[in-house]
Image (tube, coloured by chain):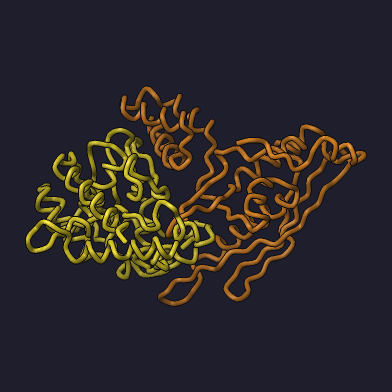
Chain colours: A yellow, B orange
Amino acid sequence: MSNEILTNEKRVGGFTSSLIFKLCTSDRAGNDFGAPALTYIQEKKYEVKLGRSLDTGANSQAISWGTFMEQRVFNLIGFEYLITSDETDEHPIIKGWSGSKDLIVPKVKVSDIKCYQLKNFCAYADALATEDLEHIKKNFPKEYWQLVSNAIINEVPNAEAILYAPNVSELEEIRQMAFDYEGEDQYKYRFIAELPWYELPVIPDESGYKNLNTFEFVVPENDIEFLTDRVKMAIKLRDKC
Amino acid sequence: MKDIALITSDDLSLVNNNALNELQLKQLLKATPLQYVKTRPAKGGGTWKYVTGGYVRKCLNIMFGWDWDFEIIEHTIEHGEAIVKGKLTCRVGDRTIIKMQYGNKDVMCKKADGKPLSIGNDLKAAATDALKKCAAELGIAADIYNAEDFREVNVTTGNQIPLEDIEMLFESVKESLSDNDKASIQRIIENEETTSYAKTYKKLNQLANKL
């Protein structure tokens, strides 16, 4: 993990789209924050005092796989998308609310790419296939609120969930991509070129699941209001002595 | 991107009988055009900068009118690493500039049996690396190197598409594209969205081959 992210002004002490779902949890009465939200706010409080992120970075194969596959997905989808996953965007008004979208179609939608390990892939693919927003929100709150948050920050009306697991027949090309990649962090991707196919989250060509699954929705106005209120409340609580 | 000012005209006048003429020096000293500088997200944030092998070859061709050679002096595989010693020779009239450097690449192995996937590919990558190191000794992509405080710059051969190639290809297949695709590609070109170059080039090329 670079120094930049550990001390990134936009992130340190701020609430980010990827974990914003925690702020959407409520107590039993349903009015105040739930325990996950309070823990999250406390962590942000620590970060403000500490001056750096609490996160010391992770480099698991699952994370490396997801990161590497983002480029692959980008190559598979239309020209209208712009890949931006290395940028952190801030809410235009609320300081301390930020997010890193994976893709954007300017003025239209933000998209988030997930390349999960197989069990999660199946569950999320099934949920997306329902095209039932309430079902997705209930069962995949992390993914749902991340999309909503990034849509708000980027002021676009739509959000799109993208879920990908390559077919076995795609693996040769992917391995070549990993083989050809010459970045300083190339060691992280060696496993993609070297592991046998069954140790990678790839799906058979004749699977009951599609490799690329997408679901686009108009971000509901009430969820925009709810999340915006929650972030404002969280910032207030974080800054309270 | 502004031209870098590492050497002034006063500095140049101090050197009598410079091996390179003014045009060659301009080429050498100008900032690397944006479309050849590649960035890739570093995991967990930040970015790494790269220059492409294609850019280095193009610079050498322009500067020396194709009158340059690159030889592999020796190569070896040691401790899981392919190491290549390369020699770049550039000719200017009756004068010759020679730069020698090493390039390297980790040997990739199959997990199942530990055997190398392709030593040939690893040596090729190490040779490209050596060429870039030699060219860097001449000063090619110096701005990229300086930006990194002379730390090693990563290089990639995976994304070397000049914008003008995309523009040309786009013009040739434009009529077969949907209005949406046309508008999107126009946006990519106008905004110089470098992260989309490789994808755009590949897809346009596929289309051109079909037509």
Can residue A131 be seen in the rendering of this structure? yes
Whole-percent x and y of residue A235? Answer: 29, 53
The residue drawn where x is 45% and y is 25% is: B172
Can residue A76 be seen in the rendering of this structure? no
The residue drawn where x is 50% and y is 27% is: B168
Against B81, residue A151 (above or below) is above
Determine whether, in the image, residue A167 is placed left or right of residue B76.
left
Q: Nearest the camera: A95 or B51?
A: A95
Residue A55's image quarter? bottom left
Where, quadrant-wise, is the C terminus of chain B in this rendering? top left
Determine whether, in the image, residue A237 is placed left or right of residue A31.
right
Determine whether, in the image, residue B123 is placed left or right of residue A39.
right
Q: Nearest the camera: A124 or B182?
A: A124
Whole-percent x and y of residue A118? Answer: 24, 64
Extreme right residue here?
A: B16
Determine whether, in the image, residue A31 is placed left or right of residue A88.
left
The number of discs equals 0
Residue A202's image quarter? bottom left
Q: Nearest the camera: A124 or A93?
A: A93
Against B69, residue A43 (above or below) is below
Whole-percent x and y of residue A143? Answer: 23, 54
Against A190, residue A142 (above or below) is above
Whole-percent x and y of residue A239? Answer: 32, 57
Extreme front residue here?
A: A241
Extreme left residue here?
A: A29
The residue drawn where x is 16% and y is 51% is: A128
Q: Nearest the camera: B117 or A221?
A: A221
Where, quadrant-wise, is the N terminus of chain B in this rendering? top right
The residue drawn where x is 22% and y is 59% is: A22
Extreme top residue here?
A: B175
